[in-house]
Amino acid sequence: MTSIDDFLVLVHDEIGLTIGPEHADLPLDQVPGWDSMHLLALLSALERETGRPISLPDVLEARNLHEIHEVAVRA
């Protein structure tokens, strides 16, 4: 899962949100269907997918899906 497109597929598959590249840079509160519980589910899915721990504080600082993706790929 290195590309933003792969990341967005993971978000869809794990959380069930229908999103596309146009949603990656939106503030999280503007992503259709997003709520704060999705963040924890996504963090768990990312750790499972990457096989590495991902910094919760860094994910909490992310303002959008693109920034969460950046945290995940540099972990």
Image: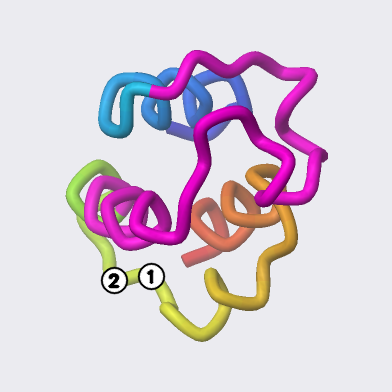
Residue 63 against residue 34 in the figure, above or below? below
Residue 53 image point, x, y percent? 29, 71
Query: Would you name the residue on which mark 2 appears?
Result: 53
Q: Position of residue 5 (x, y in %)?
A: 58, 19
Q: Which residues are magenta?
A: 17-46
Crowding near the residue tagged with mark 1, few <14, some 14–19, many ≥20 C-alpha atoms within 10 Å:
many
Color style of the picture: rainbow
* 58 left or right of 21 in image: left
**Vertical relation: 69 (above or below) 63:** above
What secondary structure is found at the residue carrying circle 2? Answer: loop
Relative to the observer, which residue lies in front, 48 or 11?
11
Tell me where residue 51 sits by quadrant: bottom left
Residue 23, position as x, y percentages in the image: 73, 27
- Check disc 1 and report its element: helix, strand or loop: loop
- Residue in view at x 49 percent, y 56 percent: 72
**What amino acid is at disc 2?**
Pro
Q: Residue furthest bottom?
A: 57
Mark identifier at residue 54: 1
Q: Amino acid at mark 1?
A: Ile
Horizontal side, residue 26 vs residue 45: left or right: right
